[in-house]
Amino acid sequence: MSTLKPERRADPAATESALSRAGIRFTAWAEKWFPDAFIFVAIAVVIVALGALANGAPAPAIAKSFGDGFWSLIPFTMQMAFVTIGGYVVATAPPVQALIDRLASIPKTGRGAVGFVAAATMLSSFLSWGLSLIFGGLLARALARRTELRMDYRAAGAAAYLGLGATWAMGLSSSAAQLQANPASLPKALLPITGVIPFSETIFLWQSMLIALVLFVMSVIIAYASAPRPNTAVTAEDLGVSVEREKPDLGRPEQPGEWLEHSPILTVLLVVIAGAWIYQEFARQSWITAISNLNTYNLLFITLGLLLHWRPKRFLVAVSKAVPATAGILIQFPLYAAISAMLTGPKNAAGISVSEVITHAFVSLNTTGSFPISMGVYSAVLGFFVPSGGGKWLLEAPYVMQAANELQVHLGWAVMVYNAAEALPNLINPFWMLPLLGILGLKARDIVGFSFLQLLIHLPVVLFLLWALAFTLTYHPPVMP
């Protein structure tokens, strides 16, 4: 009589490709050894301060630039926080939830569902990276409820992240492009270097739109082709993740003062007032100019979210759930502003700042032709340690844009080089995954194997396009407001 050995559960990573296994191991290492993103920006503050000292700047001048710069970016910090909040309240509104359910009925296979999530997420990212994260996560959950598809939930989660990992910086919520289009949001030290660069010279360049199109098509194909087939797919049920819809408990008004919280009267009045202002903004200028103003952009999303939630109570519940996702922005962006001030402010006896030292290094090591590639690689590497498009731009812009001026590289294209390259490390950096992972009920290691595969293919394609398309543009000096 034979005896049967107890069945051992196979290692899920062993069923994936070599590239996916490498990505899973890399993320496991990063989760074990990498501290919170705040630690990286704190280290950056110390390094820049030491660099300014080594450059010969007086210690009191360094301390003063830190304090003066710390609060210089508060408007932009709040604007970025509202990008997150606005995207969340719109994506979680009942009409959008109904739209998500309808969209989830379209795919016919599990692999098709993964490709569909990738496409929907990236399209929404052109409007708002905050919207894309939440929308993509909710769509993946809705598709996971269709158990007959046998969709790999991990691959779908990675596809839901492609908006932030591939295309968001090429769209309307690009932090660098928004900053450069809004002189009131730029640090005073940066404005003379870059001038004002409108959207027509950044995200709406035909070269930028071509890269966005290539990234979109390529990412959907990779997402579909890398998704496991039904016999090897790991579903949400297999992972022990519940994907049932959560309905907020709004309760009933028990006191007279609570009645207005559940009535749409104030919602309608607020939307009318806000809508009138938004209409005036679009009527008095081109829509490109209007939407490039972060205040208009954010109020548009907040107003739409308020209207879609209909009742103030439901809207406030959505806002309260969105606020925790802004914690990193609120505490880190002031430090980024302080670093920018320390890079450009304190000077040595010869009148040279740290930013100018780095600029000279960039210029000496590059030509006009090589600048897009070197800046792209540098931005991508730095992006893993400083996972913030807007914050990191404030660190890089003082010296890379000065180098672009000296090498006569189109300044708008330099912004787009940064945008396209900066998004790449997001594919393996857990920082911006957190809001999405909270919705999916997964860990970073569950999805990064698939996103790492995207990174390996994106990197050479993006760098080539940034280099080749740079030759189609002509340099123009900075334009002051």
Image (cartoon, grey):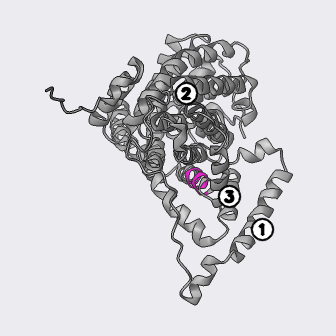
Residue furthest out toward the front: 1
Type of the residue with mark 3: Pro
- Give the numbered dot on residue 95: 3
Above or below, 145 relative to 17? below
Q: Which residue is mark 2?
A: 223
In three-dimensional space, the C-alpha distance between marks 1 and 2, rounded to whole angstroms, equals 42 Å
Which is nearer the eye, 274 or 295?
274
Q: Nearer the viewer, mark 3 or mark 1?
A: 3
Q: Given the image, on which type of amino acid does mark 2 rest?
A: Ala
Residue ranking furthest to the bottom = 256
Pointer 2 local density, CA inside 10 Å: few below 14, some 14–19, many at least 20: many
Instruction: Provide the secondary structure element on which disc 2 rests.
Output: helix
Label 3 packing within 10 angstroms: few (<14), some (14-19), many (20+): few
Place of residue 120 in the rendered image (x, y in percent of width and height, measured from the top left): 64, 38
Residue at 74%, 71% in the rendered image: 268
- Per the model, the C-alpha gap separating discs 3 and 2 is 28 Å
Q: Is residue 344 above or below residue 273?
A: above
Q: In the rendered image, is residue 375 in sight?
A: no
Residue nearer the viewer, 129 or 355 = 129
Q: Earlier in the sequence, mark 3 or mark 1?
A: 3
Sequence-earlier tag: 3 or 2: 3
Residue ID for mark 1? 272
User: From which residue to which does the magenta span run?
Assistant: 82-89
Instruction: Evaluate whether residue 141 shows in this view.
Output: yes
Cα gap from disc 3 to disc 1, whole angstroms: 19 Å
Q: Element at badge 3?
A: helix
Expressed as whole percent of the image width and height from the top left, the position of residue 458 reads: 54, 21
Q: Quadrant of residue 461?
A: top right
Main secondary structure along the magenta-highlighted residues: helix
Q: With 411 as the anchor, is 71 left or right in this view?
A: left
**Contact, mark 3 vs mark 1 (Cβ under 8 Å):** no
Q: Is residue 223 above or below residue 346?
A: above
